Every structure is written in structure tokens, then in C-alpha cells.
Amino acid sequence: MPPAELWPEIQEIRREHDPQSRRWPPHVTVMFGFVPESSFEEAAPVLAAATASIPPFTARLRGVRAFTHRDGSTVWLDPASGGPEPWAALRAALERGFPNCQGRSDGYTPHLALGKVRDPERFTADWETRLGEETAPVGELVLLSRRGEEPMRPRATVALGAGEVRWLDHGTHPPGSPPDPARTPEDGHGEDDSGEARAREVVERLRSSLTEGVVHVAGSRRLGCALPGADLDLVAALPSTADLTDLTAVEARVRTALPEATGLRRVIGARVPGLRFRVGDLDVDLVVIPVTAATTATDTTGDTEGTAVTGVAGAVNVTPAEAVSRRVELGEASAIALSAVSDADAVLASVGEHRAAFAGLARKVKAWARARGLDSAPFGGLPGLAWTVLAARTVREAGDLPPGDLLRHFFGTWAAWDWHRPISLGPEALIPRTEGTPTIPGTEGTPTGLDSPVTDPGEPPIGAKGSPEGSDGPARSDRSARSDRSDGSGRSSDGRPGAAVSIMTPTAPVRLCSEQVGSGGRDLLAQEFYNAWEIVEAASETGRDPRPELLSAPPSHRRHAAWAVVTVRAGRSEGFEVTLGRVRGRMRALLTALEYARVRDAHAWPRPFETGPGIARYAVGLGRTPPDAAGLTEITAPWAAGLRGVGVEWAEGGEVPTLD
């Protein structure tokens, strides 16, 4: 690719005469019909060996020439006017490394295409005058690929004479070429004042409307680590004796308090019913918990228009103000919903006087997790609570480290972690075990007041591989060894049931908050933690800001040779958002089906790559050795059969756009 100072004149000609000017940057093709991007990492060592013997050279760009075709001519700038020998040597070295990628049989002519015309004589002299004679250093080979309908973009460079491979995953671009104007993800700063003010106003208006009960803020906003655009999670404890016996009444109160709310709908498939709506650009989730004057033994989720919210376990007398502290008396489902409040408070209590350090670290970590597609439990990632537990553990154990060192400590700790070992903010002795699960010596017992054990607990710890002071940090081989312990089915290698990742909630009912992560997701987490640790360590040595690299999109197209594209369309029987919610709720089941079919490295990207009126499309990466189209249909047909308006199609790696 020519240096940036040569682009303006070249691109002016190309924009007018080259129909591919928006798809291709100006370039000199050395080998066309190369391997797909999913094979770039495998090809890189071969490229490095081939180019190591070719020293950098200077190209002289002079002379405008043409290739004649039946339907016109391709006019091009000659980059070999100073002699074709170095170009020929580079081409020959690549042909030896990639004998099946030689392209056309009529020889190799280095050229920089300027346009396609019918009468080249009209243009060649003028363009030659405009472009003149220039020299440009040729010091590296650039690998390009196309994703979806995007233009061809550089993905890696290989240095001539040295063979050094540099991946362009972090918003970087080849030296001398203009930067790619790609969108930069959130950098981990907190929400601005207007977003916080809007959230506070919504809470105040709901509290004024639901005066009989107590409306609690939960999630990241309670913890003080909300990112821009974060949802507002609310838990309302309402007396069942008031005129709030079903969601219809609660919905009416919400409409009165927030007449500008849009998309108001009921969420009745979860453990407890609730409402979901939007105020401006703020998404709100309101969970409704009935208390006092209970008449049934179990919580009711229901599925009718007048969905009842009066089912409370046992005939207990609990006021709305006591609901959080006495949550275990209200039945498992209500207790879990209310623990969103107590869990957040416990996380804050665990960091003590280091709340500011915790909030800053948690925001950076959650921004990184979002950029890397690791932040959505329905898609096989970790939920927000799990990330805050990891951040709180780091802050509690690290002491008064400055922010940069604290981030390094975070990634170093979890890059070295043995993910078969449970993680909690409390003593491991309080982690409950299920029947039939081997007991960890010294961890017998369950927390006081907890009568529901954790389902699918973690395996016994096999010893944490920490990164002690003065060590060289986590070892990559540890991660590979751990990944061999599972066959992808959610069981360990000796057949015992066990969670792939065991991060526990901090308050009763103590349970896994990481149960959505499968064995492939665990291995991806370990890989991403290690990569992030390498980035922050290298940045600390050079003094550069690690955020652009940390917050770049992952190299998904190098990791996945094919995709399962899940298309959700609006149906006639229910609203599109309801259908979308059902699909999100069952996405983990799709990943489980893939795991059982031995697609070990599947990864569902948690945000749609295409949206429109009544349609959303999601990409599920199928790894380096994916099933073919027929195999994917066999795996996914039972999953899709129960979802109206949902289809799953196989797509080659380059058919899906960049995921960010």
C-alpha cells in the first residue's frame, strides 16, 4: 500500500474511474486468491519465513499503462519502473510458501490499479502528468480481507527482511496509510451527568407513584460503576394487600408516573414477573415482588393478561421495608430477585474504604468485557454481578494500588486463575454443595438461613496458579491444560457434573452467577484474560495507554471459519420485542447444543450485527473446524423448532461483518 502522502491524487483518479475504489484501498497486489481470514494465523509463520529472506526495497512509481480486456481496459500506475526484480523475488518467495495461491497463469505484473475505461489513450498521458514520479519504501507485506459488505481492510503486516508479524486488531493501520475511521468503543468512563440525572428522575417518579412499597435500585447503578447507556435495574417490593395484585395495576401506575415511556411490556417468563420499558434512551427493568398477606406456597409467574403477583411462599408477615433483609422467607424466586439489592450492597461492603478504586476498576473491566463480547450471560458470557465480584476481589486483595497497577493486577490475577476453583467474596466454607458432588475438604456446610443449594456447582479446586510478586506472570500453558478437562458437555473429564466457571453470589441465596458459561466460554475467558494481561504489561513497559488495544473488537474472523446466523423476524402472534426476548433467553441452549455436538469453540456475539424494523440478526462463531451447512441444520433444528419467526443459517467466515 502506498504511503499516505501519495493517496490524495491516486484516490481522486480512482473515485472517478475505478468502481472498486470504495471496496479496495490503493495497493499493489502480490498474491490474490489468498487463504481466508480464519486461516491467517496459520499462514502467518509461513509468510514470516518467506519474507524474512526478502530485504526491504524502494519502489519507483512512474508511468501509466493499461491491460486490455474484451470489455475495456484497466489503467494502472507502474510501481516497478525502477526494475521488476524485487517484486519478482517477493512473488516467488510467496509462491514457494503457498503453491496453491498463484492466481492467474499468465504471469505476474506488479501494478497499482487506477481505473477501468474503454479508451485508455484518453487518460494515460494526463494521469501520468498528474501523478509524476514518486518513490516509496516497500518494507512490509499487508494482509487484507473483506467482511460482509465492508471494504477490504488491512488485518496484519509482515515485515520484509525480518518476518515480524503485526496484527492490526487494535484500531492500528499500516505505517504511512490513513487510519481506518472505525467506531471507537466506550473507554470505561462513567456515565455523564445527563444520564445519571435521567435515571434518578425515573426512580423518584416511580417511588412517588408506588408509595405503598419500596423501589430499590440494583445492578451497576447501585454499585456506582454504570457505563454510558447502562440499563436501570429496579426491584419493587409491593404489599399484596394494596391495589397492586397484578401487573395490570402496576403497569397503570408506571404509565401515570412516566407517560413518555415507550415499549412498555410485561416480562412474565422469568422467575418473578416484571415490566420492561424505555424512557428516552434509558432502558428500564422493573421486577415486582409481592410481600405481606401471602396466601400461596410458591411464587406465581403466570402467563395471562392479569398476571398475578400475589404468590408469596408461606403465610409470613414481611413489610416492603423488610423485604430485602428477610428475603429468604419469601420463597426462592423472590429471594433471588431481592438479592440483586443485597448482593450489590455486599460487594460495596467488601471493598470497604476503596469504593472509588473499585468503581473505577469495575467500569474499565466491564467496558473491556463488552468490547470483547464477554458481558452477556444469555449469550454464554458473565453477567454484571460476576464482573463486579472479580473486581471487588481484586481491590480487596490489592490494597492501595494506583489505577494502572490495579488494572494490571486484575488481569494478572484472573489470567492465572484455575477456573475449576470457586470464586466468592466470602469464606469458601460457605459455598453450598449439591448432593453427589464431591465435597472440598474444609468447605462443608451452607450459609445460615439458606435452604436451597446451588445447582451445578463447581469442581473441587485443584490449586490456584497465582502470579506471585516477582514472578513472570501467568503461564499460557496452564490455560491449555485446563481446557483439556472437559469434552464440551459441561462435565469434567472423569464424568462428574460441574460448572465450567464457579463465581458465587455474595449473599443468600448463595448460588452460581456464572452458570451460563460453558467449557468453551471458560476457555475463551482464560484466553481473553491472558491477552489483556499481555497488553497491560507491554503498555506499562512502554508508557503507552493500553485502552485502545483493550477496547478493540476481538479477532472473531480469525477465530471462526464459519458462522451460525440466527435471524429473528417479527411474528403475527406476539410483539417483536417479545420474540427477541425469547430468543435471547434460549441462546444458551443453542450453545449447549453446539457443545454437545463437539463444536468446542463456539462463541455467540451478544449484539445483533444487523437490525431493522421487525428483524435482528445474530452471529454465532463456529470455531476453526466448524460443521458444514447440513451438520449445522441437524444440530440447530430442534432448538429453532420451538421459536416462531426464527431461523438459523450457515455462513462462511467473510459473509458476516465486523462484530463490535
Image (cartoon, rainbow, N blue to C red):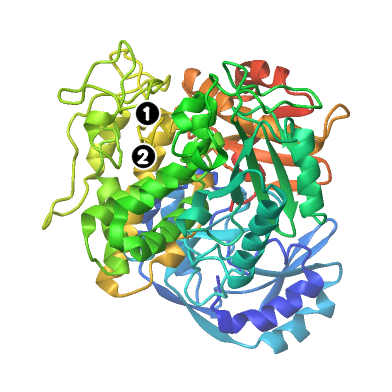
Q: Residue at x 70, y 43 (%)?
A: 276
Vertical order, 114 against 306 (above or below)? below
Taking 439 as reference, is 260 left or right? right
The image shows residue 206 at horizontal and vertical percentages of: 69, 52
User: In the picture, residue 31 is in which quadrant?
Assistant: bottom right
First in sequence: mark 2 vs mark 1: 1
Number of the label disc, if any, that sits on residue 500: 1
**Residue 81 sits in which quadrant?**
bottom right
Q: Residues within 10 Å of mark 2 (few under 14, many from 20)?
A: many
- Rounded to the nearest angstrom, the CA distance separating label 2 from label 1 is 19 Å
Asked whether, in this view, residue 328 is left or right of residue 478, the answer is: right
Picture quadrant of residue 618: top right
Tell me what residue is drawn at x 29 percent, y 33 percent. Answer: 422
Residue 506, which numbered label? 2
Which residue does the image show at 75% across and 32% down from the upper left?
579
x and y percentages locating residue 366 in the rendered image: 46, 54
Disc number placed over residue 116 in the picture, else none: none
Q: Kindly identify the amino acid type of the residue bearing the numbered disc 2.
A: Pro
Q: Is residue 512 left or right of residue 222?
A: left
What residue do we see at 50% from left, 80% from top? 136
